[in-house]
Image (cartoon, grey):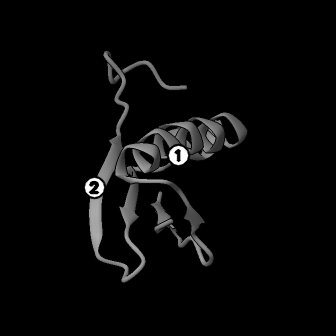
Amino acid sequence: MPRYFFDIVDGQDLPDPEGSVHSDLAAARIEAIRYSAEVLKEMPERFWECERWVMTVSDARRSPLFTLNFHAEMAHPKIAG
């Protein structure tokens, strides 16, 4: 089974040093959503403090396959959290 790497950038580089094995690209896509939700749930303050939150999923050769981009902005800039 192929290995995939799930690297995150949120103002800091958070590389996935080991990756994980999934049956195919479809399974890696599902894992990317699941893992993103897990990370965002565990560190919500980091999401709001960063300009951009990106997960890049790469294959075993570290060639990028797809990215997930999360971005939030206040509807009314005068409202500060």
How crowded is the residue under tag 2: few (<14 C-alpha within 10 Å), some, or many (20+)?
some
- Which of the numbered marks, if any, corresponds to residue 66? 2
At a point 52% along the width and 56% down the height, the residue shown is 22
Relative image position of residue 20 (x, y in whole percent): 59, 64
Residue reaching furthest to the right: 42
47 lies above or below 11: above
Labels 2, 1: front one: 2
Residue type for callout 1: Glu
Question: Relative to 76, does residue 14 appear above or below in the rendering?
Answer: below
Q: What element carries label 2?
A: strand
The percent position of residue 28, horizontal first and vertical second, equals 45, 50
Are dots 2 and 1 in contact, CB under 8 Å?
no
Q: Mark 1 points at which residue?
A: 49
Q: Tag 2: residue type?
A: Phe
Q: Residue 8, position in %: x, y? A: 48, 61
Q: Is residue 41 left or right of residue 2?
A: right
**Identity of the residue drawn at 40% across and 44% down:** 29
CA–CA distance in space, label 2 to label 1: 24 Å
Comes first in the chain, label 2 or label 1: 1
Q: Is residue 11 above or below residue 59?
A: above
Q: Residue at x 51, y 65 (%)?
A: 1
